[in-house]
Amino acid sequence: MVHWTAEEKQLITGLWGRVNVEECGAEALARLLIVYPWTQRFFASFGNLSSPTAIIGNPKVQAHGKKVLTSFGDAVKNLDNIKKCFAPLSKLHCEKLHVDPENFRLLGDILIIVLAAHFGKEFTPACQAAWQKVVHVVAHALAHEYH
Amino acid sequence: MVHWSAEEKQLITGLWGRVNVEECGAEALARLLIVYPWTQRFFDNFGNLSSPTAILGNPRVRAHGGKVLTSFGEAIKNLDNLKGTYSKLSELHCDKLHVDPENFRLLGDILIIVLAAHFTKDFTPACQAAWQKLVGLVAHALARKYH
């Protein structure tokens, strides 16, 4: 089981309370698709992904980004039980969606950058360290049910 | 040889012109030491690294961070010859400093986050993509002379 210090929990939940999930989720997914273009293969049905501008403005990308980050919020509410919390999603990503778990790590990296870009100075090194731990644990949990 | 589009070069050099090398360099090295504490082993003689606050305020960390990022500036002036530019530094990091090349990748990741935190909205997805390409290539060039 993962151990969280009181400070880490505070840094995570404190920042999360100020995150605009719709905006940050859309941006995170858009950045993933732009910076790592091969990830677009999972979203072939999303329509126009032909340029950064198209991706950023794509309503399906925005909606799905929000859905993904909302789900991330479940991890923040269940820091002591992330594996169990993400077990069904892990099975889904393995059995139905066939997503290489490496992509969970990439999205986690992207989320850190989005948070840094949104919160600027307030995304302190201690804050970054706590959030890198969260995204790592979430990526691990999402890969946990893979077979 | 690496191919850079005109847009990528513009995104890199354009942003670089606005980077406070001393400040960003200090922050990048501090974040590396805080977020990836094992990297502190390379800086034993730097004095007090006992907490994020100590690391951020440590004058040797600040000075060395500035030095590292200044060297990064050399890459930007020589985008078409990164391998040649970093050949000697690569030998130094292998033969004298014994730094695991994985740490170059980590520092590159950290630099992206520092740029995102400093430039916020201006650190667009396209900008991020160009800079991620650069840090990946610099890390590769620094590892190239390892044996």
Image: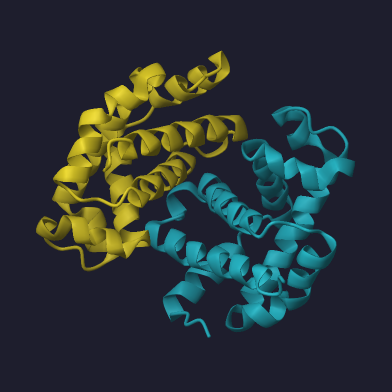
Chain colours: A yellow, B cyan
Q: Position of residue B98 (x, y in %)?
A: 78, 58
Which of the 4 quarters of the picture holds residue A129? top right
Residue at screen point 35% across, 45% down? A104
Is residue A122 visible in the rendered image? The answer is no
Answer left or right for B125 relative to A40.
right
Answer left or right for A84 relative to A5.
left
Which of the 4 quarters of the picture holds residue B122? bottom left
Q: Position of residue B38 (x, y in %)?
A: 70, 40
Foreground pick, B119 / B30: B30
The quarter of the image holding the C terminus of chain B is: bottom right
Foreground pick, A18 / B129: B129
Q: Position of residue B124 (x, y in %)?
A: 41, 56
Q: Position of residue B34 (x, y in %)?
A: 67, 36
Q: Find the residue positioned furthest to the bottom.
A: B1
Is residue A66 visible in the rendered image? The answer is yes
Q: Is residue A15 above or below residue A61?
A: above
